[in-house]
């Protein structure tokens, strides 16, 4: 048996170009066919394969770059959102604190104004009661005075003469004038 290298080198072993048939020498035909097919594939497919691999590599690199850019922007937006959230939480705490203190201040102001209003109403009530008492006292005095005057006039008219009657009226008018000055 010949070696595989001898079948490549020896030109006498090759069949002539004009004949067609089956070569039953497995060791001689398959390695040659395989080496020719692999050689052709490597020669012609090398460029196509390297172009495909380069394009795939570029797409992968672009995808990675785009993903990293998106990730970077997402991280920036997340940080901005965290800062905004922190700011909003701080403002909310301030509003809560200010709101509670303002509510307490308004509550105290309302209580104080209510006490002042109640005090004013109490004073007004007391003044009204005092005024009404004075008015009632004055009305009673006037009625008593009128009744006493009418009784005295009736007594004087029945008992006195005209001259005495006129002197008594003048004296009473003088007393009424004095009483009026005292009450005013």
Image: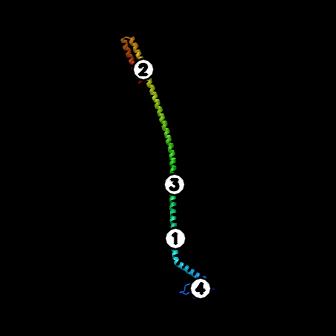
- Residue 167 in which image quadrant: top left
Name above or below for residue 6 compared with residue 54: below
**The C terminus lies in quadrant:** top left
The x, y position of residue 28, in whole percent, is 59, 83
- Alpha carbon of mark 2 to alpha carbon of mark 1: how far? 123 Å
The earlier-in-sequence mark between 1 and 4 is 4
> Of the residues tagged 2 and 1, which is closer to the observer?
1
The local secondary structure at tag 1 comes to helix
Identified at 50% across, 43% down, the residue is: 103
The x, y position of residue 104, in whole percent, is 51, 43
The local secondary structure at tag 2 comes to helix
Q: Which mark is residue 143?
A: 2
> Of the residues tagged 2 and 4, which is closer to the observer?
4
- Alpha carbon of mark 1 to alpha carbon of mark 3: how far? 42 Å
- Alpha carbon of mark 2 to alpha carbon of mark 4: how far? 163 Å
Crowding near the residue tagged with mark 4, few <14, some 14–19, many ≥20 C-alpha atoms within 10 Å: some
The x, y position of residue 110, in whole percent, is 49, 39
Can you identify the residue that label 3 sits on? Answer: 85
Q: Which mark is residue 56?
A: 1
The earlier-in-sequence mark between 2 and 1 is 1
> Of the residues tagged 3 and 4, which is closer to the observer?
4
> Of the residues tagged 1 and 4, which is closer to the observer?
4
- Alpha carbon of mark 3 to alpha carbon of mark 4: how far? 81 Å
Is 50 in front, or is 92? Answer: 50
Can you identify the residue that label 4 sits on? Answer: 7
The x, y position of residue 36, in whole percent, is 55, 81
């Amino acid at each position: 048996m010949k070696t595989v290298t001898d079948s490549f080198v020896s030109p006498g072993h090759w069949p002539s170009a004009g004949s067609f048939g089956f070569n039953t020498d497995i060791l001689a035909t398959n390695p040659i066919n395989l080496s020719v097919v692999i050689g052709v594939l490597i020669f012609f497919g090398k460029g196509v394969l390297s172009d495909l691999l380069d394009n795939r590599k570029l797409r992968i690199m672009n995808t990675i770059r785009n993903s990293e850019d998106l990730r970077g922007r997402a991280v920036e937006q997340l940080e901005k959102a965290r800062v905004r959230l922190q700011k909003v939480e701080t403002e909310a705490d301030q509003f809560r604190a200010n709101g509670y203190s303002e509510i307490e201040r308004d509550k105290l102001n309302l209580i104080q104004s209510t006490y002042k209003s109640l005090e004013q109403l109490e004073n007004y009530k007391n003044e009204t009661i005092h005024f009404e008492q004075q008015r009632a006292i004055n009305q009673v005095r006037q009625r008593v005075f009128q009744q006493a005057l009418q009784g005295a006039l009736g007594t004087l008219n029945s008992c006195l003469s005209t001259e005495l009657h006129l002197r008594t009226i003048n004296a009473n008018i003088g007393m009424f004038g004095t009483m009026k000055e005292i009450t005013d």
